[in-house]
Image (cartoon, rainbow, N blue to C red):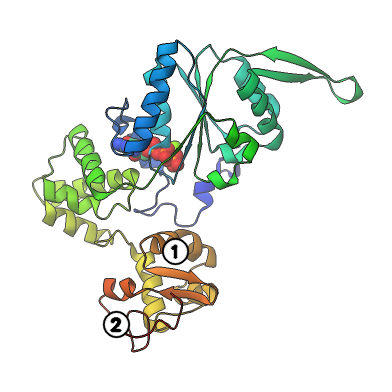
Amino acid sequence: MNWDETTEDAATPQADRLVGASADHEDQAVEAALRPKDLGEFIGQERVREQLDLVLRAARVRGATADHVLLSGAPGLGKTTLSMIIAAEMGAPIRITSGPAIQHAGDLAAILSSLQEGEVLFLDEIHRMSRPAEEMLYMAMEDFRVDVIVGKGPGATAIPLELPPFTLVGATTRAGLLPPPLRDRFGFTAHMEFYGPPELERVIHRSASLLDVEIDTAGAAEIAGRARGTPRIANRLLRRVRDYAQVKADGQINRDIASVALGVYEVDGRGLDRLDRAVLEALLKLFSGGPVGLSTLAVAVGEERETVEEVAEPFLVREGLLARTPRGRVATPAAWAHLGLTAPQGRPGAGGQPDLFGA
Ligand SMILES: Nc1ncnc2c1ncn2[C@@H]1O[C@H](COP(=O)(O)OP(=O)(O)OP(=O)(O)O)[C@@H](O)[C@H]1O
Ligand SMILES: [Mg+2]
Protein backbone atom coordinates (compact mmCIF):
# COMPACT_ATOMS: atom_id res chain seq x y z
CA MET A 1 0.00 0.00 0.00
CA ASN A 2 1.08 3.50 -0.79
CA TRP A 3 1.62 5.43 2.45
CA ASP A 4 -0.35 8.39 1.14
CA GLU A 5 -3.39 6.17 0.93
CA THR A 6 -3.10 4.98 4.48
CA THR A 7 -6.26 5.93 6.29
CA GLU A 8 -6.87 5.92 10.01
CA ASP A 9 -8.96 2.79 9.59
CA ALA A 10 -6.31 0.90 7.67
CA ALA A 11 -3.84 1.74 10.42
CA THR A 12 -6.20 0.45 13.09
CA PRO A 13 -5.35 -3.11 13.95
CA GLN A 14 -7.95 -5.68 12.91
CA ALA A 15 -9.89 -3.11 10.89
CA ASP A 16 -11.00 -5.88 8.54
CA ARG A 17 -12.81 -8.00 11.13
CA LEU A 18 -16.36 -9.08 10.37
CA VAL A 19 -17.75 -7.27 13.40
CA GLY A 20 -15.59 -4.15 13.00
CA ALA A 21 -17.66 -0.97 12.82
CA SER A 22 -15.54 0.90 10.25
CA ALA A 23 -16.36 0.55 6.58
CA ASP A 24 -14.21 -1.94 4.66
CA HIS A 25 -13.81 -1.94 0.87
CA GLU A 26 -16.79 -4.16 0.27
CA ASP A 27 -18.99 -2.00 2.53
CA GLN A 28 -18.01 1.08 0.57
CA ALA A 29 -18.97 -0.62 -2.66
CA VAL A 30 -22.42 -1.79 -1.53
CA GLU A 31 -23.47 0.81 1.03
CA ALA A 32 -24.64 3.36 -1.49
CA ALA A 33 -27.32 0.93 -2.65
CA LEU A 34 -28.53 0.28 0.89
CA ARG A 35 -28.69 3.89 2.10
CA PRO A 36 -32.16 5.17 3.01
CA LYS A 37 -32.92 8.16 0.77
CA ASP A 38 -35.23 10.22 2.99
CA LEU A 39 -36.14 10.66 6.66
CA GLY A 40 -39.17 8.40 6.32
CA GLU A 41 -36.94 5.51 5.21
CA PHE A 42 -34.37 6.11 7.94
CA ILE A 43 -34.92 3.49 10.65
CA GLY A 44 -34.73 4.18 14.40
CA GLN A 45 -33.08 7.20 16.08
CA GLU A 46 -36.61 8.47 16.72
CA ARG A 47 -35.62 11.58 18.64
CA VAL A 48 -32.94 12.65 16.17
CA ARG A 49 -35.33 12.07 13.28
CA GLU A 50 -38.12 14.04 14.86
CA GLN A 51 -35.88 16.98 15.78
CA LEU A 52 -34.17 17.03 12.41
CA ASP A 53 -37.52 16.86 10.67
CA LEU A 54 -38.60 20.01 12.54
CA VAL A 55 -35.38 21.86 11.77
CA LEU A 56 -35.63 21.06 8.04
CA ARG A 57 -39.37 21.70 7.78
CA ALA A 58 -39.03 25.08 9.48
CA ALA A 59 -36.26 26.07 7.10
CA ARG A 60 -38.38 25.02 4.13
CA VAL A 61 -41.37 27.00 5.41
CA ARG A 62 -39.20 30.09 5.78
CA GLY A 63 -37.65 29.47 2.39
CA ALA A 64 -34.29 29.65 4.15
CA THR A 65 -31.15 27.56 4.16
CA ALA A 66 -31.16 25.06 7.05
CA ASP A 67 -29.05 25.67 10.13
CA HIS A 68 -25.68 23.92 10.44
CA VAL A 69 -26.00 20.37 11.77
CA LEU A 70 -23.49 18.32 13.76
CA LEU A 71 -23.88 14.54 13.70
CA SER A 72 -21.97 12.67 16.37
CA GLY A 73 -21.87 8.95 17.01
CA ALA A 74 -19.92 5.73 16.64
CA PRO A 75 -18.91 4.43 13.18
CA GLY A 76 -21.63 2.81 11.09
CA LEU A 77 -24.65 4.36 12.83
CA GLY A 78 -25.76 6.43 9.85
CA LYS A 79 -24.01 9.83 9.90
CA THR A 80 -23.10 9.88 6.22
CA THR A 81 -26.54 8.53 5.39
CA LEU A 82 -28.23 11.32 7.35
CA SER A 83 -26.12 14.01 5.71
CA MET A 84 -27.33 12.86 2.31
CA ILE A 85 -30.89 12.75 3.59
CA ILE A 86 -30.58 16.35 4.81
CA ALA A 87 -29.58 17.47 1.32
CA ALA A 88 -32.35 15.40 -0.27
CA GLU A 89 -34.99 16.76 2.11
CA MET A 90 -33.88 20.31 1.35
CA GLY A 91 -33.75 19.61 -2.37
CA ALA A 92 -30.19 20.86 -2.28
CA PRO A 93 -26.99 19.58 -3.87
CA ILE A 94 -24.37 18.11 -1.53
CA ARG A 95 -20.60 18.47 -1.54
CA ILE A 96 -18.66 15.85 0.37
CA THR A 97 -15.26 16.31 1.95
CA SER A 98 -13.50 15.38 5.17
CA GLY A 99 -11.30 16.90 7.88
CA PRO A 100 -8.16 14.99 6.86
CA ALA A 101 -8.62 16.13 3.22
CA ILE A 102 -8.44 19.77 4.31
CA GLN A 103 -4.86 20.32 5.33
CA HIS A 104 -4.58 24.03 4.53
CA ALA A 105 -7.01 26.86 5.03
CA GLY A 106 -6.69 27.47 1.28
CA ASP A 107 -8.20 24.04 0.56
CA LEU A 108 -11.26 25.03 2.56
CA ALA A 109 -11.45 28.50 0.99
CA ALA A 110 -11.53 26.91 -2.46
CA ILE A 111 -14.42 24.64 -1.49
CA LEU A 112 -16.40 27.34 0.33
CA SER A 113 -16.05 29.88 -2.45
CA SER A 114 -17.43 27.46 -5.03
CA LEU A 115 -20.58 26.55 -3.06
CA GLN A 116 -23.98 27.37 -4.51
CA GLU A 117 -26.68 29.04 -2.47
CA GLY A 118 -28.38 26.50 -0.17
CA GLU A 119 -25.83 23.76 -0.88
CA VAL A 120 -25.04 21.21 1.82
CA LEU A 121 -21.36 20.88 2.66
CA PHE A 122 -20.72 17.54 4.36
CA LEU A 123 -17.52 17.62 6.39
CA ASP A 124 -16.80 14.10 7.62
CA GLU A 125 -14.35 13.53 10.50
CA ILE A 126 -14.58 17.21 11.28
CA HIS A 127 -12.46 16.70 14.41
CA ARG A 128 -9.45 15.96 12.20
CA MET A 129 -9.33 19.31 10.41
CA SER A 130 -6.22 21.49 10.71
CA ARG A 131 -6.27 24.43 13.08
CA PRO A 132 -6.08 27.25 10.49
CA ALA A 133 -8.88 25.64 8.45
CA GLU A 134 -10.95 25.36 11.59
CA GLU A 135 -10.60 29.05 12.29
CA MET A 136 -11.61 29.92 8.76
CA LEU A 137 -14.65 27.70 9.19
CA TYR A 138 -15.78 29.65 12.30
CA MET A 139 -16.20 32.81 10.27
CA ALA A 140 -17.73 31.02 7.32
CA MET A 141 -20.34 29.33 9.50
CA GLU A 142 -21.28 32.46 11.40
CA ASP A 143 -20.98 35.29 8.91
CA PHE A 144 -20.85 33.46 5.55
CA ARG A 145 -17.59 35.20 4.86
CA VAL A 146 -13.94 34.18 4.64
CA ASP A 147 -10.72 36.14 4.51
CA VAL A 148 -8.53 34.87 1.73
CA ILE A 149 -4.87 35.66 2.35
CA VAL A 150 -3.06 36.75 -0.78
CA GLY A 151 0.73 36.93 -0.85
CA LYS A 152 3.28 36.06 1.82
CA GLY A 153 5.14 37.80 4.63
CA PRO A 154 4.75 41.54 5.32
CA GLY A 155 3.08 42.13 1.94
CA ALA A 156 0.28 39.61 2.59
CA THR A 157 -3.22 41.02 2.55
CA ALA A 158 -6.56 39.55 3.59
CA ILE A 159 -9.26 39.86 0.96
CA PRO A 160 -12.76 39.38 2.38
CA LEU A 161 -14.97 37.11 0.32
CA GLU A 162 -18.74 36.85 0.72
CA LEU A 163 -20.19 33.34 0.64
CA PRO A 164 -23.70 32.28 -0.31
CA PRO A 165 -25.70 30.84 2.60
CA PHE A 166 -24.99 27.10 2.92
CA THR A 167 -25.64 24.33 5.42
CA LEU A 168 -22.62 22.74 7.01
CA VAL A 169 -23.20 19.15 8.12
CA GLY A 170 -20.29 18.01 10.26
CA ALA A 171 -19.84 14.39 11.31
CA THR A 172 -17.63 13.09 14.08
CA THR A 173 -17.08 9.89 15.99
CA ARG A 174 -15.32 11.94 18.68
CA ALA A 175 -17.56 14.86 19.66
CA GLY A 176 -15.42 15.35 22.77
CA LEU A 177 -12.46 16.36 20.59
CA LEU A 178 -14.28 19.30 18.99
CA PRO A 179 -13.24 22.69 20.31
CA PRO A 180 -16.21 24.40 22.01
CA PRO A 181 -16.20 27.41 19.62
CA LEU A 182 -16.78 25.00 16.73
CA ARG A 183 -19.42 22.98 18.55
CA ASP A 184 -21.28 26.18 19.49
CA ARG A 185 -21.63 27.24 15.87
CA PHE A 186 -23.92 24.35 15.00
CA GLY A 187 -27.60 25.19 15.31
CA PHE A 188 -28.50 21.56 15.87
CA THR A 189 -26.50 18.64 17.24
CA ALA A 190 -27.68 15.08 16.81
CA HIS A 191 -26.23 12.36 19.01
CA MET A 192 -26.68 9.02 17.32
CA GLU A 193 -27.22 6.09 19.66
CA PHE A 194 -26.58 2.40 19.13
CA TYR A 195 -29.65 0.64 17.68
CA GLY A 196 -31.81 -1.81 19.57
CA PRO A 197 -32.59 -5.29 18.18
CA PRO A 198 -36.03 -4.31 16.79
CA GLU A 199 -34.54 -1.48 14.72
CA LEU A 200 -31.70 -3.69 13.50
CA GLU A 201 -34.24 -6.31 12.46
CA ARG A 202 -35.98 -3.67 10.37
CA VAL A 203 -32.64 -2.63 8.84
CA ILE A 204 -31.98 -6.28 7.96
CA HIS A 205 -35.41 -6.86 6.42
CA ARG A 206 -35.08 -3.69 4.39
CA SER A 207 -31.58 -4.57 3.14
CA ALA A 208 -32.61 -8.16 2.41
CA SER A 209 -35.40 -6.95 0.20
CA LEU A 210 -33.06 -4.54 -1.64
CA LEU A 211 -30.56 -7.38 -2.11
CA ASP A 212 -33.35 -9.72 -3.18
CA VAL A 213 -32.67 -12.17 -0.36
CA GLU A 214 -35.42 -14.12 1.38
CA ILE A 215 -35.23 -14.02 5.16
CA ASP A 216 -37.80 -14.83 7.84
CA THR A 217 -38.44 -13.02 11.12
CA ALA A 218 -36.38 -15.39 13.24
CA GLY A 219 -33.46 -15.25 10.82
CA ALA A 220 -33.42 -11.45 10.95
CA ALA A 221 -33.62 -11.53 14.76
CA GLU A 222 -30.68 -13.94 14.91
CA ILE A 223 -28.50 -11.60 12.83
CA ALA A 224 -29.72 -8.49 14.68
CA GLY A 225 -28.67 -9.97 18.02
CA ARG A 226 -25.08 -10.28 16.79
CA ALA A 227 -24.77 -6.92 15.04
CA ARG A 228 -23.45 -4.92 18.00
CA GLY A 229 -26.10 -2.22 17.74
CA THR A 230 -24.71 -1.09 14.38
CA PRO A 231 -26.55 -1.07 11.02
CA ARG A 232 -23.30 -1.35 9.06
CA ILE A 233 -22.42 -4.57 10.90
CA ALA A 234 -25.99 -5.87 10.49
CA ASN A 235 -25.76 -5.36 6.72
CA ARG A 236 -22.35 -7.01 6.57
CA LEU A 237 -23.45 -10.06 8.57
CA LEU A 238 -26.51 -10.32 6.35
CA ARG A 239 -24.29 -10.52 3.25
CA ARG A 240 -22.14 -13.26 4.80
CA VAL A 241 -25.20 -15.25 5.87
CA ARG A 242 -26.64 -14.84 2.37
CA ASP A 243 -23.41 -16.32 0.91
CA TYR A 244 -23.74 -19.29 3.22
CA ALA A 245 -27.43 -19.77 2.43
CA GLN A 246 -26.74 -19.69 -1.30
CA VAL A 247 -23.85 -22.15 -1.16
CA LYS A 248 -25.05 -24.55 1.52
CA ALA A 249 -28.84 -24.28 1.31
CA ASP A 250 -31.58 -23.01 -0.97
CA GLY A 251 -30.70 -19.34 -0.49
CA GLN A 252 -33.40 -18.63 2.07
CA ILE A 253 -32.36 -17.40 5.49
CA ASN A 254 -33.97 -18.68 8.68
CA ARG A 255 -32.74 -18.86 12.28
CA ASP A 256 -30.76 -22.09 11.82
CA ILE A 257 -29.02 -20.94 8.66
CA ALA A 258 -28.13 -17.58 10.26
CA SER A 259 -26.87 -19.21 13.41
CA VAL A 260 -24.74 -21.84 11.68
CA ALA A 261 -23.37 -19.35 9.15
CA LEU A 262 -22.31 -16.85 11.82
CA GLY A 263 -20.80 -19.73 13.77
CA VAL A 264 -18.64 -20.48 10.73
CA TYR A 265 -17.49 -16.85 10.79
CA GLU A 266 -16.86 -17.12 14.56
CA VAL A 267 -19.34 -14.41 15.52
CA ASP A 268 -21.11 -15.67 18.63
CA GLY A 269 -24.68 -15.17 19.86
CA ARG A 270 -23.86 -11.83 21.39
CA GLY A 271 -21.74 -10.49 18.53
CA LEU A 272 -18.33 -11.30 20.03
CA ASP A 273 -15.71 -12.53 17.60
CA ARG A 274 -12.63 -14.69 18.14
CA LEU A 275 -10.52 -11.81 19.49
CA ASP A 276 -13.20 -10.64 21.93
CA ARG A 277 -13.61 -14.16 23.25
CA ALA A 278 -9.85 -14.74 23.48
CA VAL A 279 -9.53 -11.65 25.69
CA LEU A 280 -12.41 -12.74 27.93
CA GLU A 281 -11.18 -16.32 28.10
CA ALA A 282 -7.67 -15.26 29.13
CA LEU A 283 -9.10 -12.94 31.75
CA LEU A 284 -11.29 -15.68 33.20
CA LYS A 285 -9.15 -18.78 32.83
CA LEU A 286 -5.62 -17.45 33.35
CA PHE A 287 -6.33 -14.63 35.78
CA SER A 288 -9.46 -15.90 37.54
CA GLY A 289 -11.39 -12.87 36.33
CA GLY A 290 -8.77 -10.25 37.26
CA PRO A 291 -7.86 -7.64 38.15
CA VAL A 292 -5.03 -7.89 35.66
CA GLY A 293 -3.02 -5.18 33.90
CA LEU A 294 -3.67 -4.44 30.25
CA SER A 295 -0.13 -5.34 29.15
CA THR A 296 -0.25 -8.72 30.87
CA LEU A 297 -3.63 -9.46 29.35
CA ALA A 298 -2.36 -8.49 25.89
CA VAL A 299 0.66 -10.79 26.17
CA ALA A 300 -1.60 -13.61 27.29
CA VAL A 301 -3.70 -13.36 24.12
CA GLY A 302 -0.68 -12.72 21.89
CA GLU A 303 -1.90 -9.32 20.71
CA GLU A 304 -0.64 -5.76 20.90
CA ARG A 305 -1.76 -3.70 23.89
CA GLU A 306 -3.49 -1.26 21.52
CA THR A 307 -5.42 -4.04 19.82
CA VAL A 308 -6.83 -5.26 23.10
CA GLU A 309 -7.55 -1.77 24.36
CA GLU A 310 -8.98 -0.21 21.20
CA VAL A 311 -10.41 -3.13 19.26
CA ALA A 312 -11.72 -5.64 21.79
CA GLU A 313 -12.35 -3.76 25.01
CA PRO A 314 -14.80 -1.00 24.04
CA PHE A 315 -17.48 -3.50 23.03
CA LEU A 316 -16.78 -5.80 26.00
CA VAL A 317 -17.16 -2.81 28.34
CA ARG A 318 -20.32 -1.64 26.57
CA GLU A 319 -21.79 -5.13 26.88
CA GLY A 320 -21.03 -5.18 30.60
CA LEU A 321 -18.65 -8.13 30.25
CA LEU A 322 -15.47 -6.40 31.32
CA ALA A 323 -14.70 -3.45 33.58
CA ARG A 324 -11.68 -1.18 33.56
CA THR A 325 -10.69 -0.45 37.15
CA PRO A 326 -7.71 1.42 38.62
CA ARG A 327 -6.15 -1.96 39.51
CA GLY A 328 -6.67 -3.51 36.11
CA ARG A 329 -9.21 -5.33 33.97
CA VAL A 330 -11.92 -7.25 35.78
CA ALA A 331 -14.48 -9.68 34.41
CA THR A 332 -18.09 -9.12 35.42
CA PRO A 333 -20.50 -11.90 36.43
CA ALA A 334 -21.99 -11.69 32.92
CA ALA A 335 -18.62 -12.66 31.44
CA TRP A 336 -18.50 -15.93 33.38
CA ALA A 337 -22.05 -16.67 32.34
CA HIS A 338 -21.40 -15.83 28.69
CA LEU A 339 -18.49 -18.25 28.40
CA GLY A 340 -20.35 -20.88 30.42
CA LEU A 341 -17.75 -20.88 33.19
CA THR A 342 -18.16 -20.79 36.94
CA ALA A 343 -16.43 -18.06 38.90
CA PRO A 344 -14.19 -19.27 41.73
CA GLN A 345 -15.59 -18.57 45.21
CA GLY A 346 -15.08 -15.00 46.35
CA ARG A 347 -14.91 -13.63 42.83
CA PRO A 348 -17.46 -11.34 41.27
CA GLY A 349 -19.88 -13.65 39.60
CA ALA A 350 -19.45 -16.43 42.13
CA GLY A 351 -22.89 -15.61 43.49
CA GLY A 352 -23.69 -14.29 46.95
CA GLN A 353 -20.07 -13.39 47.65
CA PRO A 354 -19.01 -9.88 48.58
CA ASP A 355 -17.63 -7.92 45.65
CA LEU A 356 -14.00 -7.50 46.71
CA PHE A 357 -12.74 -6.33 43.38
CA GLY A 358 -14.69 -3.18 42.72
CA ALA A 359 -16.03 -4.51 39.43
N1 LIG B 1 -31.09 4.33 10.30
C1 LIG B 1 -30.70 3.53 9.31
N2 LIG B 1 -31.60 2.84 8.59
C2 LIG B 1 -31.19 1.99 7.62
N3 LIG B 1 -29.92 1.79 7.26
C3 LIG B 1 -28.97 2.45 7.94
C4 LIG B 1 -29.32 3.36 8.99
N4 LIG B 1 -28.19 3.87 9.49
C5 LIG B 1 -27.18 3.33 8.79
N5 LIG B 1 -27.65 2.47 7.87
C6 LIG B 1 -26.84 1.66 6.94
O1 LIG B 1 -25.56 1.47 7.51
C7 LIG B 1 -24.53 1.79 6.59
C8 LIG B 1 -23.53 2.66 7.28
O2 LIG B 1 -24.08 3.93 7.53
P1 LIG B 1 -23.22 5.28 7.35
O3 LIG B 1 -22.19 5.12 6.29
O4 LIG B 1 -24.16 6.41 7.22
O5 LIG B 1 -22.50 5.32 8.78
P2 LIG B 1 -21.54 6.46 9.37
O6 LIG B 1 -22.11 6.86 10.69
O7 LIG B 1 -21.33 7.53 8.36
O8 LIG B 1 -20.19 5.64 9.61
P3 LIG B 1 -18.67 6.22 9.66
O9 LIG B 1 -18.49 6.83 11.02
O10 LIG B 1 -17.82 5.00 9.49
O11 LIG B 1 -18.52 7.20 8.54
C9 LIG B 1 -25.21 2.45 5.39
O12 LIG B 1 -24.97 1.70 4.24
C10 LIG B 1 -26.69 2.38 5.63
O13 LIG B 1 -27.29 1.58 4.65
MG1 LIG C 1 -19.65 8.10 7.32
Residue 253 appears anywhere in the view? no
**At label 2, which amino acid type do we have?**
Gly
Residue situated in front as seen by the camera: 73 or 296: 73
Residue situated in front as seen by the camera: 289 or 253: 289
Question: SS at mark 1?
Answer: helix
Is 51 left, or right, of 135 in this rendering? left
Q: Residue furthest bottom?
A: 345
- Residue drawn at x 53%, y 63% as measured from the top left: 306
Is 269 left, or right, of 3 in this rendering? left
Is 116 left, or right, of 194 in this rendering? right
Q: Which residue is mark 1?
A: 313
Is 325 left, or right, of 222 in this rendering? right
Q: Which residue is mark 2?
A: 351
Residue situated in front as seen by the camera: 148 or 181: 181
Where residue 13 appears, x then y in whole percent? 49, 57
Q: Quadrant of ligand 1?
A: top left
In terms of image quadrants, where is residue 210?
top left
Point out the tag, 2 or 1, that comes first from the N-terminus.
1
Where residue 343 appears, x then y in whole percent? 32, 83
